Image (spheres, rainbow, N blue to C red):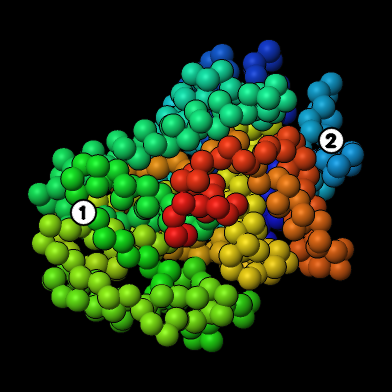
Amino acid sequence: MTDYSIRKYRQSLIIGLIGVVKELFPGEQLKISHSILDGVYCELEASVLSSREIQKIEDHLKTWVLSDQTIPYETGNEHLYHCQLDNQKITTIYPPLERSGSLKHFKLIHFIPGFILLFPNANHPESLSPFIPPEKLSATFSETQRWLENLHLSNVQDVNAIISAKSSQDLIYLAEALHEKKISSIADQIFEQRSKVRVILISGPTSSGKTTFAQRLSTQLRVNGLRPVALSLDNYFLPREETPLDCNGQCDFECFEALDLPLLAAHLNALIGGAEVETPLFDFVCGGRCPVGRSMRLSPDEILLVEGIHALNPSLLPSLDRTQMFKIYVSALFQLNIDAYTRVPTTEVRLIRRLVRDDKFRGIDPARTLAQWESVRRGENNNIFPYQEEANVMFNSSLLYELNALRPYAEHLLISITPECPHYEMAVHLLTLLSFFNSLDISTVPFNSILREFLGGSAYNV
């Protein structure tokens, strides 16, 4: 299943869920809050659901699926889709499937105060993966939600209203201040464990802002008197012609084996042992290493800071004691939704980031970025998400205003994709998503912002 077809499957189940909840709990408002693992977290605005009530919702949803009903919808302006449930009109950014009978795989899981609607994994669409409660990921979402409530922000229109009122500078500074406060807190935690920690490992999915986060964390660590030395796993990519291929014959940059593992292991062990190495520098435009690398040695009073999508993979440093490592998971968990039923998918926020960055800094056109996305998502499911709960802490790199700031740049790229392109449907969808966000002047975005990693103008070497 492609990422787009998966979204249609999920959207169809959500429409059925909305109808079932409306029938069972008249007068209540269902909120589709955020994605979590292979599902979405949902809750009722005024009630805490019991296990018995959640089972009742699941049973009714199964009945709706077995009835194999037509899911009627109309296409509106700007590629939106309107579904009619009794006297309620639901607007979606994905079209549903034609009939409910094809939605055979799902489950509702009690997750206080609401529940998780669990979907099939993209890599295994005919089954459900075992569900392990993502306690740290859930806590990170809850922390962000509390912050939004403190600012009295509930949806995208609230941010648009601030921009329209020409108060965007305050919004930018608030969002950036939250990042700085969280990064400082993480640095303090590392400082408290400074007698043990030898390596800091920073991981997260593509376009989560790991590189800028690592730079800003390094600054905070130095404020605390520590001496971090950065090492990016991206510099250990194999030359493009040696990169493993995925099942579709495309370069699989997300797999662990896309790295020069023998060289990486030798360098990591040498650095931790105090030896000097010449680490490679990778040129993403030409797809190979630069002729000259960077000499590097780790002094006894320095701490190694390793950043990359595979940094939390246990195979990276199998012989190092867990107490000597501090693990950080970074992801852009965008949490402002369009309305109670319509989420802004966090993966699509990262895709928009990546489209802009690939064009600006990696010589990759938007059609190619979209073509690679299925492989990227498969790689994340296989190589990154399974290890996220291994982290000591999680950092949400999302910014309230980012899609407003990215809109003009991403639109310019997406408009260039023609109907003949096999990824035209996804391009149109992303344009529809961006249409909900008022454009924002980026001149006041700080030069140390994570967003600068994608927009350009960063104070760091990213």
Residue occupying the point 67% across, 38% down: 441
Q: Compare residues 54 and 47 and report the one nearer the observer.
A: 47
**Relative image position of residue 109 (x, y in whole percent):** 49, 36
Q: Quadrant of residue 445?
A: top right
Neighbours of disc 1 within 10 Å: few (<14), some (14-19), many (20+)? some
Side of 123 relative to 279 (left or right): right
**Residue 193 got which mark?**
none
Q: Which residue is mark 1?
A: 227
Q: Quadrant of residue 313?
A: bottom left
Q: Amino acid at mark 2?
A: His
Residue occupying the point 29% across, 68% down: 316
Q: Compare residues 224 and 17 and report the one nearer the observer.
A: 224
Is any part of residue 154 visible from this angle?
yes
Q: Which residue is mark 2?
A: 82
Mark 1 secondary-structure assignment: strand
**Relative image position of residue 362 (x, y in whole percent):** 59, 68
Residue occupying the point 29% across, 43% down: 220
Q: Compare residues 3 and 222 and report the one nearer the observer.
A: 222
- Image vertical order of residue 89 relative to residue 433, above or below: above
- Whichever of labels 2 and 1 marks the residue nearer the N terminus, that label is 2
**Relative image position of residue 53 (x, y in whole percent):** 54, 23
**Relative image position of residue 422 (x, y in whole percent):** 79, 67
- Image vertical order of residue 331 relative to residue 72, above or below: below
Neighbours of disc 2 within 10 Å: few (<14), some (14-19), many (20+)? some
Residue occupying the point 36% across, 33% down: 181
Side of 198 relative to 305 (left or right): left
Depth-wise, is mark 2 or mark 1 nearer the camera? 1
Q: Amino acid at mark 1?
A: Arg
